[in-house]
Every structure is written in structure tokens, then in C-alpha cells.
Image: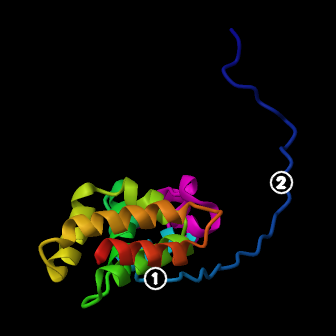
Amino acid sequence: MFPLHRTSTTPKPTPARRTTTTRTAYITVRVMSLTREDVVRGAMAVLGEEGHGALSMRRVARELGVSPMALYNHVENRADLVDAIAESFLRWTHEPGGTLGEQGARLLDGYLRWPYMLAIVREADHALTRAATEAITAELGPRAREDWAAVRALAEGLSSADDVDAPAVFARAAAAITS
């Protein structure tokens, strides 16, 4: 019969004793109280740097220095983020008490300042843009709905025109529409 285990008469060498130094690592954790406005600002920074095509939850999270999952505490998904950006922009362009021409000029100024906003507003939920239109036209009177549609279309068209002085053309056209 074969032995079940091998017996050795020579002693096994003892492994060399290794000494290790254990260092306690202190990790600095940056606690950031993120808000929906922070997420919108981060998304606008991404849009400004890289354009509309670069807008993603991962890219916005990287811009803010948080994990992508942290964003979902403030926005449901990319569509909700786009709606929040459009709402913030439309709120910025709406000046209570302003005339239709002033409202349109501010809208054009926003489109010229942030060219990606036209794509964002077009991608946003139509109910959101309808609500912004209602807020503007409620202050300006019954005929304002059609006038605002014309002024808004003019601002959107001029925002992508390279060969004209958009603010000057807009001022003349808006005056003609609203007179």
C-alpha cells in the first residue's frame, strides 16, 4: 500500500518573517449638498463647454464631481434635466411687466448668448413651453398670444442667422409686429 501522506525526515524551512507597516489612510470626503439648481448649472456648464450632444447624466455628474446616481435625487432622467434647463432659461427671459418687444428681445439675447438653448427649448416638454407662453401672454392682453408666437419665431430664426445684426433686425421687426 502506498502511504497516504509523505513523511519527511528533513524539517521544513520556516518562512522569513515579514514585517509590514500598516498605515491608516484618512480619506477626506467632500460633503456637498446638491440641489436641483446645482444640477441645472452643471448641465449648463457642460452645454457651454461641449454643446448639446454632450449632455448626459454621466457628463453632468463628472462636471459636479459626484456620482451619476446622485443626480437622480434631483432629476428623474435626462428629459427631466432638459425640462429643468429650459424652465430656468424661460424664467430668466421672462421679465414681469415688460412689453412684448422687451420679452422677445430678452429671449433673443438669451439665444445669442447661449446658442444651445434653442435646441434645449425645442427638446423640452411642450407643456413647459406652453406654460411659459401663458405666463407671458396673460400679462400682455388677449391679442398677445399670436404676437408672442411671431416674436418668439423671429427670435429663434434670428438666433441662428450669421449674416445680420440680429438685435437690430429684431427690434425693427418686433416693433412692426406689436404696433
Number of the front mark, 2 or 1: 1
The image's mark for residue 76 is none
Amino acid at dot 1:
Met
Q: Secondary structure at mark 1?
A: loop
Q: Quadrant of the N terminus?
A: top right
Q: Nearer the viewer, residue 108 or 55?
A: 108
Q: Is residue 30 visible?
A: yes
User: Does residue 56 show up magenta in the picture?
Assistant: yes
Amino acid at dot 2:
Pro
Q: Quadrant of the C terminus?
A: bottom left
Drawn side of residue 4 relative to residue 140, left or right: right
The x, y position of residue 61, in whole percent, is 51, 65
In the image, farthest residue toward the left? 142
Magenta residues, start to end: 46-70
Q: Nearer the viewer, residue 83 or 138?
A: 138
The x, y position of residue 66, in whole percent, is 51, 70
- The tag earlier along the polypeptide, 2 or 1, is 2
User: Does residue 149 show up magenta in the picture?
Assistant: no
Residue drawn at x 63%, y 67% as measured from the top left: 49
Q: CA distance from mark 2 to mark 1?
A: 49 Å
The residue carrying mark 2 is 15
Q: Quadrant of residue 5?
A: top right
The residue carrying mark 1 is 32
Residue drawn at x 26%, y 88% as measured from the top left: 96
Q: Secondary structure at mark 2?
A: loop
The x, y position of residue 3, in whole percent, is 70, 18
Count the marks: how many? 2
The reply to whether the C-beta atoms of the residues labelled 2 and 1 are less than 8 Å apart is no
Name the image colouring.
rainbow
